[in-house]
Image (cartoon, grey):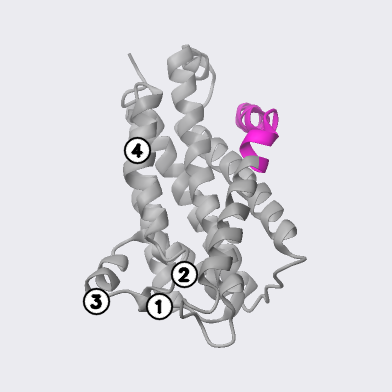
Amino acid sequence: MGFVTLLKKEVMRFWSVLGQTVTAPVITALLYLLVFAQAMQGRAPVYPGVGYTEFLVPGLVMMTVIQNAFANTSSSLTQSKIMGNLVFLQMAPLGPLQWFGAYIIAAIVRCILVATAMLLVTWPFVHLPVHAPLALAVMFLLSAGSLAVLGMIAGIIAEKFDHIAAFTNFFITPLSFLSGVFYSVHALPPLWFAASHLNPFFYMIDGFRYGFFGHADVPIWQSLLWSTGFFGVCAAVCLWMLFTGYKLKR
């Protein structure tokens, strides 16, 4: 009952401002699509038989998923700490695993809504094949889950919203833009090509694209391995924080 209540609370938190949490990211991604599709069509090398616009849409979807998954958990925890109502969750009969599961599932629900809205809006203009639906679903869940866990870590550490903004501006946004959303990494110079393979967001986006096209810059097993490893490390750190009460108990 406690887990279900917390999950419902987290879902209703973003559902009550759906225009801000779902509609706004979709509009932003569509603006990126409009600008880059017009500017880069025919110029950026992509996969054989895949137009640049088709190549761009999965990358924009995953970039939006990454940013929204992180924002959902980090903003919720930080807001609870600043407003002082986190103590009510700590007093409730909820264990660390229930906290972990409720926050992560709520973030994934938000990401599903955002991704579905983006694909529906672009469907009349861009028809995407689905080559490997299982790989598509697994990469989506791993990516959304990883960033939701990372958002929890940031929310636990943060003392104010400025700390979350710094984390977003100096980590999430740069790694998102340098992960191959707008280009194939094979078009990069050797130094940046090698550097991109150290970016976990690159594997999330590349594996997600594989699910649609059956083509990717790296083999799908590498994307799955990197994404699973990233999720595992983030989950271990987050669960340690929850079990020990790091920066949660005063």
Q: Is residue 15 magenta?
A: yes
SS at badge 3? helix
Amino acid at pointer 4: Phe
Q: Position of residue 118 (x, y in %)?
A: 67, 55
Q: Nearer the viewer, mark 2 or mark 3?
A: 3
Q: Nearer the viewer, mark 1 or mark 4?
A: 4
Which residue is disc 3 drawn over?
A: 190
In the depicted structure, whether residue 74 falls above or below residue 57: above
Residue at image location 69% in from the left, 35% down from the top: 18
Q: Between residue 137 and residue 62, name the one nearer to us.
A: 62
Q: Is residue 18 magenta?
A: yes
Local crowd size for mark 3, using a 10 Å CA cut-off: few (<14), some (14–19), many (≥20): few
- How far apart in space, not on screen, are marks 3 and 4 (Cα)? 28 Å
Of label 3 and label 4, which has the lower sequence position? 4
Which residue is disc 4 drawn over?
A: 167
Which residue is disc 1 drawn over?
A: 218
Residue 242 visible in the shown view? no
Q: Would you say the residues marked 2 and 1 are in contact, meaning their CB atoms lie under 8 Å apart? A: yes
Label placed on residue 206: 2
Count of marks overlaid on the render = 4
